[in-house]
Image (spheres, rainbow, N blue to C red):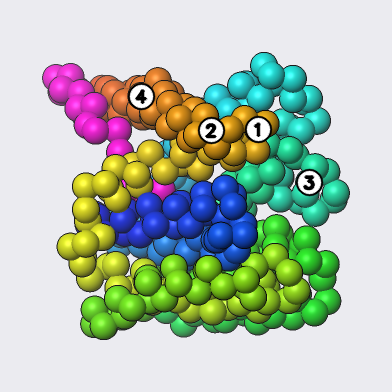
Amino acid sequence: MGRIPALDGLRAIAIAMVIGYHVDKNIVPAGHWGVPLFFVLSGFVITSSICAEVDRTGRLDLGSFYRKRLLRLYPAVLAVCVAMLAVGTTWSLVLPTLGGYANYARIGGLGLGRLTHTWFIAVIIHFYLLWPLVMRLIPARHRTKVIGGLALTAVVWRAIAIGVMSPGWVYNATDTNVAGLLVGSYLAVAAPGNWRSAGWSIPGILGLMLLPVFGDAGRGVFWGGFLALALAAMAVQYARTGPAWLEGRILLRVAEVSFGLYLWHYVFVRSDIALWVAVVSTAAATVASWWLVEQPVLRWDARLRARTRDSESFGPTTANTGSGKMEDV
């Protein structure tokens, strides 16, 4: 799949929304809308990547797929968990994060403290584990119909769940949050069309997230999620047209370190320290995570894969470490 920098810019906007929500819910009451935006974006990128590989090679290398996601997610997550253990967090609160079930631990009533935000990572992990297996079963010629049907089913189930399941389940469970991921997946296989006129969707979602009606109180937080989902879908369609303003250097840099930024900001924002100290600490930890954990692991993997290719071809070793970037995560 060709790289679309504007999608990275959209990723930066999503993380900014979530951070604003965590810093002050009174100012950004619906900043959690950054989560469905990220889900739609992730579904789109992952499904596009899977389809591109299958169309190019005729198969999906599950081992490579899982290895890439494991190395992209877990080293940074492990670093945060080790840091939390070092400051006295118990294993009972760390294990749900490492085990990829933090969302269901929250539903079960376990307070995860400064690791609460890792419920989102659990949903992503579940999607990464299961979606490639589903995609292998879908014939290429039926992708649009099948994935569209799955996306519609997921959206309908979320609507039903609002009435029959607990609020905690609706907010945290994988089966209710997969709606955004599958909507993004559908966008990846549907005809794109011309969505440049949908640029208003991004300022629209940014403006509406400031309205208290879509915040924590009442059912507005759940029913408003469908509005967020629609705006997120339009925003992704708009971003894939490559608008220049979403490719700004600052947005792309934030997107590049967005995973570490997401992991570390909540740890410090929820600590008993001044906000400016939390901001400085988050920036320092994010940079350290990028340069000392995430990038070295990706470079190591790139070298290992290059050596493997060279040995299989019996040719000279010309390892290319690349940039360590993984645009499809």
Of the numbered discs 2 and 4, the one sitting upstream in the chain is 2
What is the C-alpha distance between the residues marked 2 and 1? 8 Å
Q: Which residue is mark 2?
A: 278
Of the numbered discs 3 and 4, the one sitting upstream in the chain is 3
Of marks 3 and 1, the one in the foreground: 1
Of the numbered discs 2 and 1, the one sitting upstream in the chain is 1
Amino acid type of the residue that numbered disc 3 sits on in the rendered structure: Ala
Q: Which residue is mark 1?
A: 271
Label annotation for residue 254: none
Q: Main secondary structure of the magenta part?
A: loop
Of the numbered discs 2 and 3, the one sitting upstream in the chain is 3
Q: Does residue 324 appear to the left or right of 124 in the view shown?
A: left
Q: Quick one: quadrant of the N terminus?
A: bottom left
Identify the secondary structure beneath mark 3.
helix
Pointer 2 and pointer 4: residues touching (CB < 8 Å)?
no
Of the numbered discs 3 and 1, the one sitting upstream in the chain is 3
Question: How many C-alpha atoms fall within 10 Å of the one at disc 4: few (<14), some, or many (≥20)?
Answer: few
Identify the residue at image location x=73%, y=69%. 217
Q: Which residue is mark 3?
A: 105
Pointer 2 and pointer 1: residues touching (CB < 8 Å)?
yes
Task: Tell me where the magenta segment starts and ends, as one range.
Answer: 312-329
Pointer 3 and pointer 1: residues touching (CB < 8 Å)?
no
Identify the residue at image location x=69%, y=80%. 159
What is the C-alpha distance between the residues marked 2 and 4? 20 Å
Question: How many C-alpha atoms fall within 10 Å of the one at disc 3: few (<14), some, or many (≥20)?
Answer: many
Amino acid type of the residue that numbered disc 2 sits on in the rendered structure: Ala
